[in-house]
């Protein structure tokens, strides 16, 4: 994937080291949430993702989202 300046931007699963689990968080939902979280108007409130077959490993996603929310000044 290439960013707005033509620079390579790795997919989120590579950037954050997400692995695929037998049952995990829906990958599209996680990707969309993180994209919004890193954008100009991060979402507030509690987030929830559907559990699906071959989704992202939940523990790693939770760690990354907690860190990104903290960095965005949104707390946990």
Image (tube, rainbow, N blue to C red):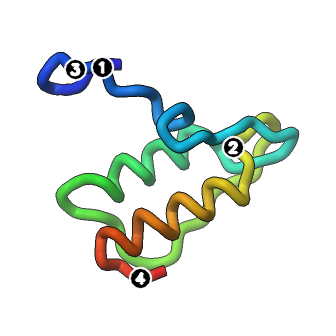
Counting residues from the start of the chain, the first of labels 4 and 1 encountered is 1
Q: Which residue is mark 1?
A: 8
| Spot occupied by residue 21 in the image (x, y as percentages of width and height) | 81, 40
In space, the residues marked 3 and 1 are separated at their CA atoms by 4 Å
Q: Residues within 10 Å of mark 3 (few under 14, many from 20)?
A: few
In space, the residues marked 2 and 4 are separated at their CA atoms by 23 Å
Q: Residue 13, located in which quarter of the rendered image?
A: top right
Q: Residue at position x 41%, y 63% from top?
A: 68
Q: Are marks 3 and 1 in contact (CB under 8 Å)?
A: yes
Counting residues from the start of the chain, the first of labels 2 and 4 encountered is 2
In space, the residues marked 4 and 1 are separated at their CA atoms by 30 Å
Does residue 30 appear to the left or right of 72 in the view shown?
Answer: right
Single out the residue that lies furthest toward the left: 5
Of badges 4 and 1, the one in the foreground is 1
Q: Secondary structure at mark 3?
A: loop
Of badges 3 and 2, the one in the foreground is 3
Q: Residue at position x 30%, y 69% from top?
A: 72
Q: Which residue is mark 4?
A: 75
| Spot occupied by residue 49 in the image (x, y as percentages of width and height) | 63, 57
Does residue 34 appear to the left or right of 13 in the view shown?
Answer: left
């Amino acid at each position: 994937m290439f960013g707005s300046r033509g620079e390579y931007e790795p997919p989120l699963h590579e950037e954050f080291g997400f692995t695929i689990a037998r049952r995990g968080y829906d990958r599209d939902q996680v990707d969309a949430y993180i994209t919004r979280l890193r954008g100009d108007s991060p979402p507030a409130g509690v987030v929830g993702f559907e559990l699906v077959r071959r989704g992202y490993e939940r523990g790693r996603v939770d760690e990354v989202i907690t860190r990104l929310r903290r960095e965005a000044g949104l707390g946990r």
